[in-house]
Amino acid sequence: MLSEQRYEKILALLDEKKSVTVAEITELLGISESTARRDITALDKAGRLTKVFGGAVINSGSFVIQEPTVAQKVEIRKAEKIRIARHAADLIEETDFVYLDAGTSTGYMLEFLAQKKAAFVTNAVAHAQRLAAQGNRVFLIGGELKSSTEAVVGSLATETLSRYHFTKGFFGTNGISKSEGFTTPDVGEAQVKRTAMRQCRNRYILADSSKFGSISAVTFAALEDAVILTDEIPEGYQKENGIVKCGE
């Protein structure tokens, strides 16, 4: 099937459903996931749809606000996430006071932190449990627990974070866009990320390359606010912009 034919089928599906996932496109057209993502990127650049995390939405100014659960995300691009996580963990020194954001990418860092002597603060219950089991000193932020992402959010969490001063912070993101910066679907998580980043001397975003060009509902930081750790640097983005390709 020619690319233009695929484009028309994708756009027709969007007209009907208003949003479409990569999985739906691969099933409908009988193509690979990588081809589906390339088609979405091409249509996004042409202004015919809006690329978001996991798929696309019709050009109506709306965005997908539903976020996959931890269980749904943990196996997605696992090898890439582990490579990024290993690089991120290597940045931590024993004198650091570290903020570790909730999420699967930051979660993979835990596999490489057993020998670290740094102190950690996190808003992820699962992260805190594993860090403590490894013998690390860890502080868990209090607040409302969001079940789908296993993250603690809310005003109590942001108030507590505003009192800390971190040497390094490691964060996940659902989307990276030159126009909208770092984005996430949930307002509460965005507020926690924004507050924690503000309290960090050095900030790192862990993001596999599929996150580039995607936009979720809420911006929590601008691109220049953090160094991006990724597996591949997509076209249009440069190392000089604060992006590190992990594993090099």
Image: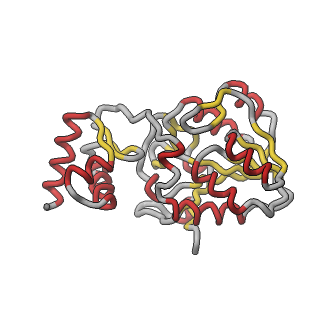
Residue depicted at x 75% and y 28%: 159
Which of the colour schemes (rainbow, by chain, secondary structure, one colour) is used? secondary structure
Whether residue 200 is visible: no
Using residue 86 as the reference point, say whether residue 241 is left or right of it: left
Q: Quadrant of the C terminus?
A: bottom right
Count of all numbered marks drawn on residues in the image: 0
Percent x, y for residue 230?
54, 61
Q: Determine which quarter of the picture holds residue 142.
A: top right
Q: Residue at position x 64%, y 54% from top?
A: 204
Name the residue furthest top. Answer: 155
Expressed as whole percent of the image width and height from the top left, the position of residue 212 reads: 45, 53
Residue 68 lies, in percent from the top left, at: 47, 41
Counting from the top left corner in percent of width and height, residue 19 is at 30, 37
Viewer-proximal residue among 215 and 179: 215
Q: Name the residue: 52% across, 45% down.
A: 71
Nearer to the camera, 11 or 82 = 82
Residue shown at 78% from the left, 51% from the top: 133
Instruction: Identify the image quadrant of the N terminus.
Output: bottom left
Compared to 15, does 99 lie above or below?
below
Residue 235 shown left or right of residue 8 in the figure? right
Q: Residue furthest bottom?
A: 248
In the rendered image of this protein, does residue 189 appear above or below residue 130?
above
Task: Tell me, yes or no, if residue 32 can be seen here.
Answer: yes
Q: Is residue 48 above or below residue 146?
A: below
